[in-house]
Image (tube, rainbow, N blue to C red):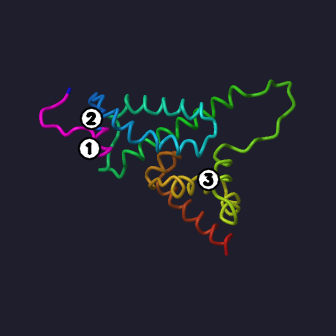
Amino acid sequence: MKRVGAAPPQELDEERLLRRVAKGDRAAFEELYRRTSPWLAVRLGRRCADQQIVAEVMQETYLAVWRAAGSFAGSGVGGSAVGWLWTIAARRLVDAFRRRAHHAEPPLAAAPQPVAPAAEEEALRDSVGGDVGDALRCLAPELREVLQAMVLDGLSVRETSVLLKVPEGTVKTRARRARIAMRKALA
């Protein structure tokens, strides 16, 4: 339902679009999708080479956005619309990896298979090479995932905290420890 004098969706920022989506505005949802889906597909593609999984995650993400847009807290609490969207997508991607791993488990009688690197490890290996890539791979996993979220994905401390389900103070501490370790490794 369009209000008289309301700005068209093309003139709104992503946060205002989400507010309208929360009220059931399909045009706002379509505009949000038009703006963010190319960026989100590329970002997910960097973490997962399987385009079918990326497409499923995209669909699940935008369905969740449509259903839960009212739960977006907004910039008043330090969040951004695209950060919120990425958090949903990243969680859906992790869920997809878990589902795939669950369905791909060998029978108990089968010989143990060598552990394959995680998709994020493969993406990290492919996107960051040389001494920096080597230094990143030597970090403890909890430090590396904080750096990936904050530096490679551009998330804020708060968004990283939500994504990784750890307190903001823990994110800050891990980011500091990771930077110190990186400096030592690259010195």
Magenta-colored stretch includes residue 16? yes
User: Which type of secondary structure does the marked residue at label 2 adopt?
Assistant: helix
User: Which type of secondary structure does the marked residue at label 1 adopt?
Assistant: loop
Specify which label sits upstream in the sequence, 1 or 3: 1
Residue 183 x, y percent position in the rendering: 62, 71
The span picked out in magenta is: 2-18
Furthest residue in direction left, as rendered: 4
Specify which label sits upstream in the sequence, 3 or 2: 2
The disc at residue 20 is: 2
Amino acid tagged 2:
Arg
For residue 69, above or below residue 168? above
Quadrant that contains the C terminus: bottom right
* Mark 3 or 2: the one toward you: 2
Furthest residue in direction bottom, as rendered: 187
Q: CA distance from mark 1 to mark 3?
A: 37 Å
The disc at residue 164 is: none
Amino acid tagged 3:
Glu
At 57% across and 33% down in the image, what residue appears? 95
Label 2 crowd bin: few (<14), some (14–19), many (20+), radius 10 Å: many
Q: Are marks 1 and 3 in contact (CB under 8 Å)?
A: no
Specify which label sits upstream in the sequence, 1 or 2: 1
For disc 1, the marked residue is: 12
Image-quadrant location for residue 2: top left
At 69% across and 64% down in the image, what residue appears? 130
Taking the image as shown, residue 124 lies to the left or right of residue 8, namely right
Amino acid tagged 1:
Leu
The disc at residue 142 is: 3
Taking the image as shown, residue 114 lies to the left or right of residue 89, namely right
For residue 168, above or below residue 3? below
